[in-house]
Image (spheres, grey):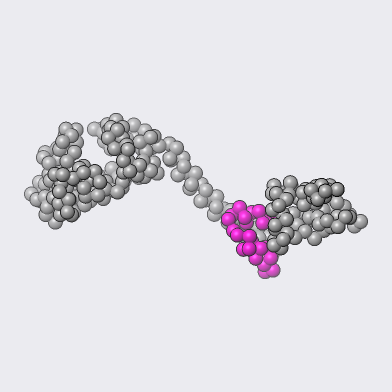
Amino acid sequence: MTSDAREWEPVITGPDGSGGLTVGRAAALVGVSVKTLHHWDAIGLVRPNGRTWAGYRVYSGDDVARIHRVLVYRELGLPLAEIGRIIDDQGVDARDHLRRQRALLVERISRLRKMVGAVDRMLGASSTGMSLTPEEQVEIFGDDWQPAWVGEAEDRWGDSAQWTQYVERSGEMSPEDWKTIAAETGALNADSAAAQRAGVMPGSAEANVLAERHRALMSRYFDCTHSMHACIGRMFVADPRFAAHYDAVEPGLAVWLRDTIYANAQAHGVDPETASWR
């Protein structure tokens, strides 16, 4: 009989009526390889104490139960050496082991659920990254919001590293996150309009604070440099739709925002007139 055949001997029953499984049968029962059980035997993690009539080791019910405990801890990511110490701890009985395993499993299930939620949000996101429906977009961003604007932005910047950042970050945002951003945007627009009415000059300390708030808001989507920010400010006036949007908040606000962003960029060493998307 070959060694492989011996490993697959049937269940062995001794004179006292006790049963045992050969290594092949035990491996098949618990779903691991024979090689794995040999390794665990060699390092003393799970060492079968029974013997076949031919002298080959067999696994008792207690041995198989120990294998299952090892498998649970291994599934939780613990190294084999630590698993051995935990299982051989004389101060911990079987029920305490089960309680410990259950607590670790509950913790892992919680982490996995969070991961599943993140994946679901990513699956729900379109190629533009935004997981909101067009109706939700209008509800959150206002009646003048055009969902097609996101597609236009993709056409313009879709090949850039910043667009990749936007897709990744926005894909993880919940509707509540978008509502928070919309509220922050509305507050910033109102504060900017109030500053313009009060005669705050672009380049002043107060105006620079507003410019940095706007740049920080852009950085929620991608890492917005001062050069990129100047390009965005330029678009506020060059694109009639952006100009109309800001001028509807306060007449002349589009130009004031551009000039404020320009002055702040210049204060950080960027020539706003020649600024590029970098």
* Most foreground residue, 59 or 103: 59
Q: Which residues are magenta?
A: 65-91
Front-lying residue, 97 or 13: 13
Taking depth in this image into account, of 227 and 138 the one nearest to the observer is 227
Q: Residue at x 52, y 48 (%)?
A: 112
> In the current view of this chain or complex, which residue is farthest to the bottom?
91
**Residue 195 point in image, percent of width and height:** 13, 49
* Total marks placed: 0
* Residue 130 visible in the picture: yes
Q: Quadrant of residue 74?
A: bottom right
Query: Left or right: where does residue 98 sit relative to residue 143?
Result: right
**Does residue 268 lie above or below 126 as drawn?**
below
Rendering coords of residue 82 (x, y %): 62, 63
Q: Is residue 174 visible?
A: no
Q: Position of residue 229 (x, y in %)?
A: 21, 46
Residue found at the far front of this picture: 2
Residue occupying image coordinates x 69% and y 62%? 43
Q: Determine if the magenta segment contains residue 34.
A: no
For the point 87% across and 52% down, which residue is it? 13
Is 85 inside the magenta-drawn segment? yes
SS assignment for the magenta stretch, majority = helix
Residue 62, image x, y percentages: 76, 57
- Drawn side of residue 140 relative to residue 206, left or right: right
Name the outermost residue toward the left. Answer: 199
- Residue drawn at point x = 66 percent, y = 53 percent: 71
Relative to the observer, which residue lies in front, 122 or 181?
A: 122
